[in-house]
Amino acid sequence: KTIDHNAPNALDTAASLLRAGGLVALPTETVYGLAADATNAQAVAGIYKAKGRPSFNPLISHVSSREMLLDYARVPAVAELLVAAFWPGPLTLVLEKAASCALTPAVTAGLATAAFRMPKQSFTLSVIEALGRPVAAPSANTSGKLSPTCARDVLADLGEAVPLIIDGGPCGVGIESTIIHIRADGEALTLLRPGTLTPDEISAVAGMPVQHYEGSDITAPGQITSHYAPNASMRLNAAYPEAGEVFIQFGPAQGTTDMPLAEETPHYTLSPSGDLSEAARTLFSVLRAADTHNKPIAVAPIPNTGIGLAVNDRLTRAAAPRITPSEKP
């Protein structure tokens, strides 16, 4: 069921199962992914079934090399710059599909574009390389719920729905990748989902500004209004917890005031020092822990700059009114 990524048989077992059309939960630096052969329609259908994921929500295809990407996508010059600078790493590029693209249609949800990433986790890169084609791998959790940042999270959420979980330890980044759409002519970049790689960093390499997506259509993973959610209701930008709430802090103060917390208030912190990278890394594990109290969750304000854009994006979606998996936002 769960195999350590350093086990002698781990790589062959994972690659063989994917080759046979099975599902494997794989570690990445962002979150754990529920992987299947991205060219196998039946295997990809298994991802949607296991997660209860809506069919209009596309998947990211994970590649092991630039050369593999070229088999599936049209890659303009600016994309080459971003690949050279940030791959492998937490950056997903949404590109026009190549004429030869063999991704099964469910991966792209019928769109003319497809999302691609090269993960930094060496074991998972080796699995993709051994398979010889991309793996579709959304987060290994029930659709809309908290993303998993360790193998134990995957097992607790999906259980028997996943034949094999590869334990690669805790994720180093902790939230999903930044997603950038690159227009077919390479003349425009649009941020579809914020991550730990910021628009300013991307713009500096690309030599052009990164626009923010203004539409409402689902063009990439992570755009559904209600997503990344615990079971409990959430209240954001809370200066102080109300009676009966769990409090999630950020920084050295109790909240936005120095008032001591009531003794009976369960509380956690995303980062005692106010470090946004640490807040991103701990976000899902802290939300998971807070959710065990079966009480509403209040979250202190997070600066909405740099990596804070990504943390606030996840919190806003986690706190949004819940929708059923089949319901378009």
Image: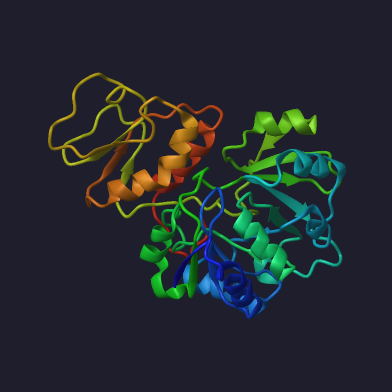
Please state if 298 lies on the left or on the right of 152 as rendered: left
185 or 116: nearer the eye?
116
Please state if 65 lies on the left or on the right of 125 as rendered: right
Residue drawn at x 46%, y 26% is: 303
Q: Is residue 52 visible?
A: no
238 or 286: nearer the eye?
286
Please state if 170 lies on the left or on the right of 234 as rendered: right
Could you tell me residue 183's position as x and y percent? 79, 46
Rendered view: 84 above or below 308: below
How many dots with numbers?
0
Quarter location, residue 187: top right
Could you tell me residue 36's position as x and y percent? 61, 70
Residue drawn at x 55%, y 68% is: 10
Please state if 306 lies on the left or on the right of 70 as rendered: left
Could you tell me residue 41's position as x and y percent? 66, 77
Could you tell me residue 326's position as x and y percent? 49, 67
